[in-house]
Image: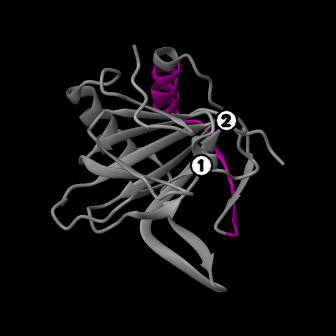
Amino acid sequence: MKQNLLPFDGEVFYRSDIFNGEISDHYLSLLLDEIAWQNDEAIIYGKHIFTKRKVAWYADAKFEYSYSKITRTAKIWNPILLEIKNRVEASTGNNYNSCLLNLYHNGMEGMAWHSDAEKELEKNGSIASVSFGAARKFMFKHKNNGERVDVWLENGSVLLMEGPTQEHWLHRLPVSKSVLLPRVNLTFRKYVGM
């Protein structure tokens, strides 16, 4: 039986049984080498900024996806991503047609509070967040009452965010000076367009 990590207003499930350590390390190495990484960019308070964190977006087709006031065009799946995607889908029973990847070089790179509620994504759809590399703390905060839930994302783990989670909860990856190794995060999603 799956245990929901959120007390209310959403569904989050943690899985550590889909990828073992050896295959996780293998995938991390391949992803670091074979993904077309680019520095992420955003427009914040009218300023165009580039982050140290790198990103990539892959999908079934050349979908256009916007966040932080920047539009990105997806690249078509490569074999390694399809292999990971197929394994996640088989284990979770969900289907995904796109994946946003993040490369955090060390613990000094993180992500501020946000929710993945862009209009191009399926409303209340499943998002599977797969982690390879350094273990990192991941935090949820309820949008109304500020209640927090923290979870450690280990190498090879899968965090499923489902139902109205994005509507009611923010999440972030805080910085950590003690983390010296890289982490690659794959967020498999269902893109539905405008």
Q: Earlier in the sequence, mark 2 or mark 1?
A: 1
Work out whether residue 104 can be spotted.
Answer: yes
Q: Which residues are magenta?
A: 69-89
Query: Taking 192 as reference, is 3 left or right?
Result: left
Q: Residue at x 32, y 41 (%)?
A: 132
Say which of marks 2 and 1 sits in front: 1
- Which residue ends up furthest to the front in the rendered image? 145
Q: Amino acid at mark 2?
A: Lys
For the residue pair 150 and 21, the one nearer the viewer reads as 150
Q: Residue at x 27, y 50 (%)?
A: 136
Residue 152 on the magenta span: no
The quadrant of the image that shows the N terminus is top left
Q: Residue at x 63, y 85 (%)?
A: 45
- Name the image colouring: one colour
For the residue pair 194 and 87, the one nearer the viewer reads as 194
Q: Amino acid at mark 1?
A: His
Q: Which residue is mark 1?
A: 168
- Residue 180, given in percent of the width and then of the height, sits at 18, 60
- Residue 13, given in percent of the width and then of the height, sits at 43, 30
Q: Which residue is mark 2?
A: 190
Query: Taking 108 as reference, is 59 left or right?
Result: right
Instruction: Tell me where residue 73 sits by quadrant.
Output: bottom right
